[in-house]
Amino acid sequence: MCGIFGMIGDGAVGNTLRALGYLEYRGYDSAGIAALRKDRIDVYKTAGRIAALKKFIGDVPETDIAIGHTRWATHGEVCAANAHPFLSPQGRFAIVHNGIIENYRDLRRELNGALFTSDTDSEIVAHLLEKEYRGNALEAVLATARKLRGSFAIAIVSVSDRVLYAIKNKSPLIVGMSEEGAYLCSDIRCASHWASSVAVTPDDTVVELSDNGARFFRLDGTPIEVAFFAPDKAEEAERVDGDFMLKEITEIPSKLRLAEQGYFSSGGLGLTRDIARRLSRVYLIGCGTAYHSGLEAAAVARQWLDIDVLPVIASEFIYDNYTVDGDTLAIFISQSGETADTVRACERVRRSGGIAYAVTNTDSSSLTFACQRTLNIRAGAEYAVASTKAYNCQLVTLTLMLLDLGRMRGTVSDATYDEVLRGLEELPRAVEKILEDGYGIAQLAEQLKNSTAIFYIGRTADYPTACEGSLKLKEISYIHSEAYPAGELKHGTLALIDNTVAVVAIATSRELRDKMASSVTEVATRGAKVIAVSPYTFENAVRLAIPETHPYLYGIAAAVPLQLLAYYIAKRLGRDVDKPRNLAKSVTVE
Ligand code: F6R
């Protein structure tokens, strides 16, 4: 989703273009930059990729102040006019914006007669700055900030004082400093390519960035102190021969080991025995793939925990009436740590006095700052929009956390705990075996790629795996797909089954093997091509074999052939697997 970057320092145009490259992974459909010249601002913007922007800009002269933006359309279609930056009517300011200005319609009405060049909510900021300008740019920025409602990280270039400003509320904004310059960025990983120290800007804050350093203000103009710290340096995103998605799937075995080691070396669950025993409920909250890992972890933890473990979609949690009190542990799951819905849900839990933990891949993210404790899943950076290895590592961390909770509550014996740990040790090898069968999965993909729909079914802990397989397929192949608890098919969905569809049955439970065999027959006799993801064989189904593993850990292994299947189907359909249409890696608006 939208990315912003701003810089004061030599080579600002070149560095800003490079930064937009680092922000590409977030997902975007247009891009632009603004360069401050001696007494004016030049804006260059295009629809399409950064490569198109670079071509459009050509060999422009360098400068020492620039801002840039990758846009993921929310208000107004994808076109150059709606791309950022926007110039204020008299050219005094240029702005880029990440987030949504919720009251932009009212603000536009107040500026009766003003000429807008775009359909965006963002352009109103440029107009307000000009309207509020009475000879002092900082005052104009503060007055503008007080008028805005919604979520926003806004970077502003001001001609009059040659300063960069920013306004921040509920969208991530990092301020960075180095010997060479000062930076504004929506992403700590990107900022760390330049900055040796960074600060996470609090909500309702205005930032002034000049040659003299950074100053932070509340919206009434009161200066505030914000702490700087040294960020972990991001690795250069190495280009891979193939796609990031495939590379990230093949990393799963090594990352599973790191997730487990990381859990123990960071001190594990970190609840006192008293608090663990007093808890009356656990929520597992996230979006998309992260929600599915919560769904799966809850399904297995039901086998051993004596309290409710409730998986909830973050955007639902915010507006529904879930009970939260001091005996509530809410675990927020997010690869990026920046998903707006998840962060808002966390704030709701904190307001109600619950205990909020983050399970994330990204330290120093908005979620880690909102939570009392963070467990890092150590999956390493994900660049493909479709999340893969983070899912498997989230499950390792969540399973260990919930097992430890069970031990503290006396519902998990040492023997069971040791068995699961042994299972975890064997898991990377089991996943390697699945990866070795990549060729078979690629061949199967060829047979499935023209299906009109692909359904995923499973029972109990296999149902969340079905949900994740289905999500992976639809997001990168654009084939219609749904996931169902297998027993639910005959209550309606069976009407859709014919010889143009395929059904992927996930069947890891020995006890439910016969039940799954009936479900497989049910769909096969209606003409569907059936694929069984299972350690067992089924009549009427092609088997994608998974090695036998500990029953609590099947979800971690069974997701892998589904990730590969989605990948190969999408490839055979010629899709851009790393950057599927309409999707963003980091969803920073609600
Ligand atoms: C699916 C996918 C999304 C994310 C979701 C949450 O492949 O990547 O469904 O899982 O947007 O993102 P995070 O985990 O960053 O909060």
Image (cartoon, rainbow, N blue to C red):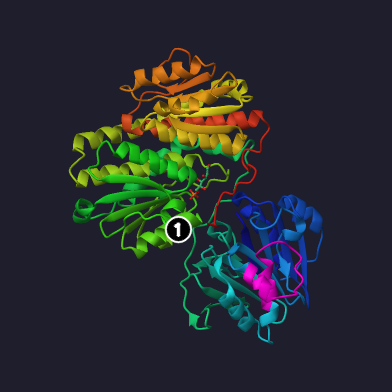
x and y percentages locating residue 213 in the rendered image: 58, 77
Confirm whether residue 126 shows in the render: yes
Q: Is residue 114 magenta?
A: yes
Indicate the amino acid at tag 1: Val
Classify 509 as above or below 255: above
Specify few, some or many for label 1: CA neighbours under 10 Å numbering under 14, 14-19, or 20 or more. Answer: many
> Considering depth in this image, is 111 or 268 the residue closer to the camera?
111
Classify 516 as above or below 241: above
x and y percentages locating residue 39 in the rendered image: 78, 78
Q: Residue at x 53, y 60 (%)?
A: 188
State the residue position of label 1.
Answer: 343
**Magenta region, residue range:** 105-129
Task: Indicate left or right for 400 with 53 as reference.
Answer: left
x and y percentages locating residue 17 in the rendered image: 70, 58
x and y percentages locating residue 85 in the rendered image: 71, 65
Confirm whether residue 364 shows in the render: no
